[in-house]
Structure formats: C-alpha cells, structure tokens
Image (spheres, grey):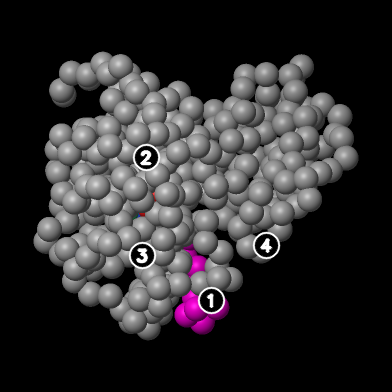
C-alpha cells in the first residue's frame, strides 16, 4: 500500500485554492447543506480510490457524484425517467440524490460496479461556486471514517483528516445536518433508499405514492445503507432511561429527546430541539452525537422520535447508530 502523505492541512473558504487541489488530482473536503464531503474528480480513478482508502470504506459502497447548476447530465447518465425529472425540477439544488442509469464515462469504481450512478446538485453556495469553476463533477462520500457519525462542521473534518488531506473548504455549519434523501426509479415507481434531508411528504407532493425501502442492511440496490452506521463509540440504545440505570456503573448517561423534557436522575437530558421542531432536531443530531461520544458517559439512550418530517430520518440514523449488526 502507498505510504500515507503528511499534509499541512489548510482550512479556508477560498474556492480557487480548493479548485487547484482538485484539478491536480487531490482529495479535498467540501461543505454541503447536508454534511461535509470528501471530494475528488469523479472521472479520476486514482483520486476516487484515494477517497475509499482515506475513509477505510469498502469498495462495495458506492459514491454520490455532485454536479454544478450548469452541468450537462448527459455526460453522466443515459436516461432520465419522467418522475426523476419532476423531482430534479422541484428539489435541485438541494438534499435530493437520484439513482439513474450511468454512461461509460462514470468509472465503475464510483458506482461499485452497479449500473446506476447516484447524482446530486448541492445547494451550498460555497460548493456551487467551487463546482462552477471546475469542469468535472465531484465524487464525494461524507467526510468521516467509515461507519462513524457524519461531519456537520469543518472542525469535525479536521478532527478526522488533519494531516491526511491538503485542504478543507470551510463553509460553516451545515444547515440541514443530515445526508441527502436517496431516490431510485423502477418503471413508474419511485423508491426511497435512504431517508434524509428532503422529507418523504415533499416528495409525495410532486410524484404521488412512493415506497420507502430504507431499512434493510442487505439490500442489493443500496449496498451502502448498512444497518450499523453513524455510530458513536459510547453504546447507544433506543428506549427509556429508567431501563438503563443499572448500566451506569458510577458514570452518567445521556438521554437524547425530541424536545425539552423533565430531568432524569443519573442522565444528562439533551433535547435535539427545545420546541420539538424536526428541522432543528435534524440540524443538531450529528453534532450532539459527537459531543456525547465522551467517556464520561456509560450509555446514550435516545427516545423514539415522532413519525413525521425530518424526525423520520433522525429515527433512521439513531436506529443504525444503535445497531451492532
Ligand atoms: O448528503 C449527502 O448525500 C452527502 C453529501 C456529502 O453529499 N453524501 C453522503 O455520501 O452521504 P455517503 O457516501 O456517506 O453515502 C452515500 C450512499 C452510499 O452509502 C450508498 O448506499 C448510496 O449512497 N449510493 C451511492 N451510489 C449508489 C448507487 N450507484 N447505487 C445505490 N446506492 C448508491
Ligand atoms: Mg456516509
């Protein structure tokens, strides 16, 4: 294996510097409205393989390709089903990723050999500015080691990749805070493979009924949606703190709730939103999980979130974080 290079990592908001690194085949962290990504030229197979290596990501877990507002999708995909077009019109740029049949130009490494490529147009202004001055799309997974909580701030990326990549493009804290919603198409059917920053309700308003198929760990059309993911090192369970008092063993527990809740003995209560707002809860989730991933806690207990809007995706992430499979 190649010797790891030791970079003097720069963290800055200058897109021209980021563009120069990317043009020379380097890996650069980029902000998006959902989470930070670890990006490279999607057509450069060596750079793509570096992204997998840096994340310790298995090659069976494909990458999302990010495009600018003026990018001609024909370079990446061979066909756009009518419902995909409707969703793209309604929600791009934004937290929506679509799975579409790829052209030969997209390296098989990017799609893990699958016939579809995942494409998204991020809305973050810094990354749109970056994409507008390079003439290739960016392959980018979330900028965290494989299986860990996704980064929602440049400081989270620095924590993981300082010295290992040359540049972190700083775009401030991520507004949405959860990864994009991933949607695929089968004939006239619309299938949601990953719940995310775009609510199911909004998608239904545009294309009617959709199937949510985001639970399984062994779904062949979505190999990366592993059951155990987004996990802090402190054990996380879903339930009620009173059932876990005996697990504290002299330490404290943390209790994640949807909204402000009365104190619980032995636990620090951490509401994702004071008022129970789903958008605010989504924005806070990964930041809160990172803060609570501290050895002063014996356990993190999360209550089951309400079943609407972005709380659904919050629940999905908490369940995967709780899974030890
Ligand atoms: O919001 C996001 O989507 C962020 C930002 C950086 O854009 N990216 C992100 O990437 O969450 P990542 O790699 O952590 O998750 C992407 C998931 C993969 O785990 C995989 O399951 C799915 O997208 N995916 C990507 N390409 C696919 C493909 N060709 N077919 C099926 N699933 C695919
Ligand atoms: Mg990820």
Q: Is residue 80 above or below residue 36?
A: below
Q: Is residue 208 above or below residue 260?
A: below
The location of residue 79, given as percent across then percent down, is: 23, 75
Looking at the rendered image, the quarter that the N terminus falls into is top left
Q: Which residue is mark 2?
A: 30
Q: Residue at x 71, y 54 (%)?
A: 277
Looking at the image, tell me whether mark 4 or mark 3 is earlier in sequence order.
3
* Residue span colored magenta: 204-217
Q: CA distance from mark 3 to mark 2?
A: 20 Å
Q: Does label 2 or label 4 sit earlier along the sequence?
A: 2
Q: Which residue is mark 3?
A: 98
Q: Is mark 2 within 8 Å of ligand 1?
A: yes
Q: Which element carries disc 4, helix, strand or loop? A: loop
The residue beneath circle 1 is 204
| Neighbour tally class for label 1: few under 14, some 14-19, many 20 plus, Cα within 10 Å | some
User: Which element is circle 3 on?
Assistant: strand
Looking at the picture, how far across and down is residue 182, in whole percent? 42, 61
Tell me: 183 left or right of 258. left
Of residue 219 and residue 129, the one placed in the foreground of this image is 129
Q: In the figure, 149 relative to 10: above or below?
A: below
Instruction: State which mark lies toward you, 3 or 2.
Output: 2
Query: Is tag 3's residue or tag 1's residue first in the polypeptide sequence?
Result: 3
Residue to which mark 4 is pinned: 307
For image coordinates 61% across by 58% down, the residue present is 310
Mark 4 or mark 1: name the one nearer the start of the chain: 1
Q: Nearer the viewer, residue 252 or 259?
A: 259
Q: Nearer the viewer, mark 4 or mark 1?
A: 1
Rendering coords of residue 303 (x, y %) = 72, 46
The residue carrying pointer 3 sits among few (fewer than 14), some (14 to 19) or many (20 or more) residues within 10 Å by Cα, namely: many
């Amino acid at each position: 294996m190649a010797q790891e290079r030791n970079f003097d990592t720069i963290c800055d908001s200058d897109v021209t510097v980021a563009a120069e690194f990317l043009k020379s085949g380097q890996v650069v962290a980029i902000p998006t409205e959902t989470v930070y990504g670890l990006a490279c030229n999607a057509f450069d197979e060596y750079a793509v393989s570096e992204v997998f290596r840096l994340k310790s990501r298995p090659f069976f877990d494909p990458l999302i390709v990010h495009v600018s507002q003026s990018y001609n999708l024909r370079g990446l995909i061979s066909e756009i089903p009518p419902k995909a077009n409707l969703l793209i019109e309604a929600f791009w740029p934004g937290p929506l990723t679509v799975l579409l049949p790829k052209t030969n130009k997209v390296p098989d490494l990017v799609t893990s050999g699958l016939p579809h490529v995942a494409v998204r147009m991020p809305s973050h202004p810094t990354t749109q500015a970056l994409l507008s001055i390079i003439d290739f799309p960016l392959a980018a997974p979330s900028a965290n080691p494989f299986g860990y909580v996704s980064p929602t701030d440049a400081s989270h990326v620095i924590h993981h990749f300082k010295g290992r990549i040359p540049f972190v493009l700083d775009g401030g804290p991520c507004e949405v805070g959860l990864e994009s919603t991933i949607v695929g198409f089968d004939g006239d059917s619309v299938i949601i493979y990953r719940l995310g920053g775009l609510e199911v309700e909004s998608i239904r308003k545009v294309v009617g009924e959709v199937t949510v198929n985001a639970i399984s760990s062994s779904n062949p059309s979505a190999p990366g949606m592993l059951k155990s993911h987004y996990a802090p090192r402190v054990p996380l369970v879903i339930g009620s703190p009173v059932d876990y008092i005996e697990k504290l063993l002299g330490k404290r527990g943390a209790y994640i709730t949807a909204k402000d809740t009365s104190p619980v003995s032995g636990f620090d209560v951490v509401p994702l939103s004071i008022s129970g707002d789903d958008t605010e809860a989504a924005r806070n989730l990964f930041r809160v999980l990172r803060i609570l991933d501290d050895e002063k806690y014996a356990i993190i207990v999360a209550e089951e979130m309400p079943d609407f809007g972005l709380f659904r995706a919050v629940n999905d992430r908490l369940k995967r974080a709780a899974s030890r499979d």
